[in-house]
Image (cartoon, grey):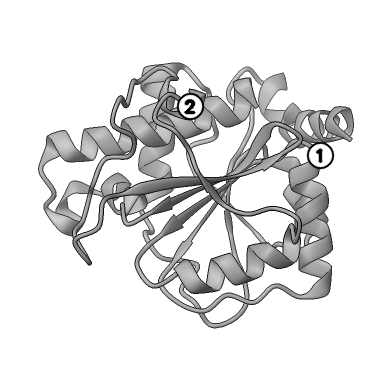
Amino acid sequence: MKKLLIVLFLLQSSVFVANGQYAYKIAKLKYNGGGDWYANKTSLPNLIKFANANLRMNIFPEEDIVEPGSPDIFGYPFVHMTGHGNITFSDADVHNMRRYLMSGGFLHIDDNYGLDKFIRREMKKVFPELNFVELPFNHPVYQQKFKFAAGLPKVHEHDGKAPQGFGLIYQGRLICFYSYECDLGNGWEDQSVYNDPEPLRQQALRMGANLLQYATTTN
């Protein structure tokens, strides 16, 4: 299945490779349930621009939108999911997401505050045998191009909690990274959106670039 997914990635991106411009695309997950899956409109383009400039990743500059039950999801090595509210996965979504992640895909879930109880419930449908585990700070996801000796940066304050990075591990492989109490995607937004200090934005972008690098090389 891993080889099949790699082939699908290459087929999806072949037009961009052929003309010497871009290697592949990444996508944002459009889910049902009423939650604002479309939040943080400038975040992924900014992250892509940063990763292309600093890691020479050659990603297409705009993200695609993909649904969890769509076969198109197999064309993306990295899928990002965010929002504040409810999420529901249908049986078809659950089956497709499980196949995607087992086959070599990677899902980044970013809690934009209020997502936690919903995403834990829905991901348990996808992998009933797995639990989110907090990743140690020496995990490779924190040790890519940019080093994060203390784990995730704290972008925005909500409940006075420390940021945490959780993962779903399938057969020894990190298939899903869940950033909690961090607002990582908010840190990728245009500086004018939240007026975050630029050094903090840079930390958020560096951590996001690590996720992309991990998903497309280590993973």
Point out which mark residue 48 bears: none
Q: Report the front residue among 177 and 166.
A: 166
Residue at the (33%, 39%) spot, across then down: 152
Q: Is residue 138 left or right of residue 57?
A: left
In the image, residue 11 above or below residue 146? below
Query: Badge 2: few (under 14), some or many (20 or more) residues near its Cα, within 10 Å?
Result: few
* Of marks 1 and 2, the one in the foreground: 2
Quadrant of the drawing holding the C terminus? top right
Residue 168 percent coordinates (x, y): 62, 46
Residue at the (27%, 47%) spot, across then down: 187
Report the Cα–Cα distance between label 1 and label 2.
Answer: 21 Å
Residue at the (43%, 24%) spot, across then down: 138
Element on which disc 1 rests? loop
Q: Which residue is mark 2?
A: 139
Residue at the (49%, 73%) spot, across then down: 117
Residue 59 percent coordinates (x, y): 54, 30
Quadrant of the drawing holding the N terminus? top right
Please name the amino acid that badge 1 sits on: Ser
Q: Which residue is mark 1?
A: 103
In the image, residue 106 above or below residue 117? above
Element on which disc 2 rests? loop
Residue 119 percent coordinates (x, y): 55, 67
Please name the amino acid that badge 2 sits on: His
Query: Badge 1: few (under 14), some or many (20 or more) residues near its Cα, within 10 Å?
Result: some
